[in-house]
Amino acid sequence: MTDIPIRPATPDDIATILRFVRDLAAFEREPDAVEATEAMLDEALFGPQPAAEAVIAEEAGAPVGFALFFHNFSTWKGRRGLYLEDLYVTPAARGKGVGGALLRHLAWIAVERNCARFEWAVLDWNADAIAVYRRMGAVGLEDWTVQRVEGEALRRMAGR
């Protein structure tokens, strides 16, 4: 693929996005972890206060990948950044430049929106993805680790 069409997701893409999220979860060895529903994604992406945005990559008019992203903020930079939550390319479309095209598209959005940075997390065992990211100029933040609180631990932390 030399010219990979990428377009903003629409409400008609919700079922496809949820399928891609489930496929990504299976790839990341967490097939039963997805709690999202079509209604939840529709509200998050297209409700009155969207929490995120998504773009769809296509081949011959059919979706072959997606990226879901949102803005974060850097107090040190004094500007917002763009955070990539999920990027997924179907197995049949891998190796054709779809993932790189999605990353370049999001980098373009970040530049257009005057974002200070473009960030994402990657599983440490996903060597193929890490190699692609390094070739594209991404730098791993070796001194940082992701911290997470969810479920019952989150309720305890909140004192509820």
Image (cartoon, rainbow, N blue to C red):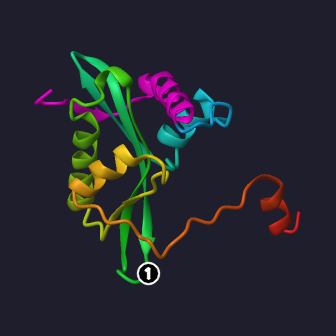
> On the rendered structure, is 65 left or right of 58?
right
**Which quadrant of the figure contains the N terminus?**
top left
**Which quadrant of the figure contains the C terminus?**
bottom right
Relative to 148, say whether 108 is above or below: above
Q: Position of residue 56 (x, y in %)?
A: 33, 32
Under tag 1, what secondary structure? Answer: loop
Magenta segment: does it hold 13? Answer: yes
Q: Which residue occupies 35% across, 30% down?
A: 65
Q: Which residue occupies 23% across, 46% down?
A: 105
Relative depth, front residue between 50 and 5:
5
Q: Position of residue 95 (x, y in %)?
A: 25, 31
Q: Which residue occupies 23% across, 21% down?
A: 59
In the rendered image, which quarter is residue 5 located in? top left
> On the rendered structure, is 14 left or right of 114?
right
In the rendered image, which quarter is residue 66 located in? top left
**Residue with the most extreme bottom position:** 76
Q: Residues within 10 Å of mark 1 (few under 14, many from 20)?
A: few
Q: Position of residue 46 (x, y in %)?
A: 48, 38
**Residue with the most extreme left position:** 2
Residue highlighted by disc 1? 75
Q: Amino acid at mark 1?
A: Thr
* Range drawn in magenta: 1-27
Magenta segment: does it hold 18? Answer: yes
Relative to 96, say whether 111 is above or below: below
Q: Which residue occupies 41% across, 49% down?
A: 69
Relative depth, front residue between 75 and 3:
3
In the rendered image, which quarter is residue 79 located in? bottom left
Magenta span: chief secondary structure = helix
